[in-house]
Amino acid sequence: MCLDQPLNYTELTDQEVIARALEGREAAYRELIGRYERPVFSLIYRLVRDRERAEDLAQDTFIKVLNHLERYDPTYKFSSWIFKIAHNTALDHLRRKNPVTLSLDGSPHARTAAEVEATTLTPASGDENPEEYTASKELGAEIERAIGLLRPEYRTAIVLCHVEGRPYEEIAQIMDVPLGTVKTFIHRARKELMKELEHLRI
Amino acid sequence: MSHQSLHPEEEQLEAYAEGVLDGGDRAVIESHVLSCADCQGAVEEWRALFAALEGLPQLAPSVGFADRVMARVTVASRSQVWAGYALAQVRAAGRAIGRWMPQTTRGWAFATAMLGLPAILVSGFIAWLLSRDYVSAESLWIAARDTVDRGAQRLGEAVVQSFMQTDVVAWLVANTGEFVATTGMRGVGTLMALAGAATMLSVYVLYRNLFRTPTRESHYVTYSF
């Protein structure tokens, strides 16, 4: 077995690339990073809204995944696994950063304005924010701002659904919640975004 | 009945705008939307939101991200590759075994009873034999060993012969009597043991169907990180 034999990884499925990585091929590891660095970083960034922190958490995610590739169960999509770890890594960070704000994590259906307020994270202040990374600055910045006002679970669900184009079933696997809960998250997130963006008449 | 009361639910309009309604529901909603300016407006609002969200870009980490990750990743060496392969096989075997394990307390109790009962009966029988004056432990061991040896030998011969026969029934008729005649009660005992094992297997399959916890409709991935 020649470990340095050149391969065109772009034509391989995730599972095939992982099999090569488990054979000790560094290029396969780099292929996985190339495939998922943007989706993973985007998700984490929109959750924590701090570029430096998002880079650290994205690195942590990849290190956890790539150092434990043998634990990957090929029954499931690799994307589900890595998004799940990214989501959990970002949520753990948010809980450590602001445990009071996220104390209602287990109760996703806030019924009162006070509960919604208590479970809402406000965007981080400072120069670094997702608005800088949007191509269409005005609309993009408004949408990023509105997403930043959502609860973290809603943000994950909306980003995975609309930016990453993941089906509801996969989002349920990633977030480890029932399918109905995902639909509720997405519906409520959309309603909140509509309300927040009403002044733009998008 | 006012026209307002006929408006679809908000979630239905949202699903219609998203394109996730099936044929029947879609046709019903569509026929209403085409004739209702309010609902047309609502659908357009949903679609505009979806388009705006789908226009958001994927964000990129800074240059050198892959290098920084790889600096902290251990690429498996040849020996680790083989160790990992062996570990994966062990895990796969563990998962395979796990699928046959009882899933409920009642299931474990039943399985334990089914496995323990024959052991108790056999142990009791051996104890009874050893209590006889004319049976020693050594003679019992020799008899058991010979029984197993001869039974296995006869069984092996019979299996080989079965491949030589074209008429299985004729072979069974011709050889069963001979097998019993030549091996005596020991051979019959071996056959009975095999039949008992088959019965146990049947009971276990029945138990799995009676006591195993049904698979959940939605199975969620769990990871041990």
Image (tube, rainbow, N blue to C red):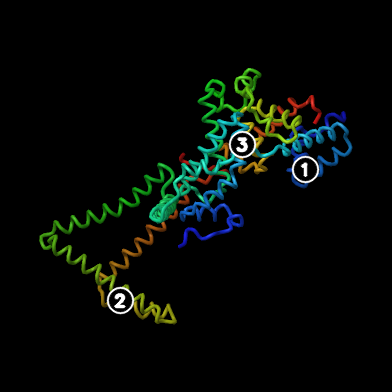
Please tell me which residue is depicted at 44% across the width and 46% down the height of the picture: B74
Q: Which mark is residue A53?
A: none
Q: CA distance from mark 3 to mark 1?
A: 33 Å
Total number of numbered discs in the rendering: 3
Q: Within 10 angstroms of label 2, few (less than 14), some, or many (20 or more) residues?
A: some
Marks 3 and 2 belong to one chain: no
State which quarter of the image contains the C terminus of chain A.
top right
Specify the quadrant of the image occupied by residue A51: top right
Callout 1: residue from which chain?
Answer: B
Say which amino acid is labelled 3: Leu
Say which amino acid is labelled 2: Phe
Q: CA distance from mark 3 to mark 2?
A: 72 Å
Q: Where does label 1 land, which residue?
A: B25
Query: Which structural element holds mark 2?
Result: helix
Residue A44: x and y in percent read 59, 34
Q: Nearer the viewer, residue A96 or A51?
A: A51
Callout 3: residue from which chain?
Answer: A
Relative to A53, residue A23 above or below: below
Query: Which structural element holds mark 1?
Result: helix
Q: Nearer the viewer, residue B14 or B159?
A: B14
The answer to whether residue B63 is left or right of residue B97 is right
Q: Where does label 3 land, which residue?
A: A43
Whether residue B207 is visible: no
Q: Where does label 2 land, which residue?
A: B179
Residue B174: x and y in percent read 36, 81
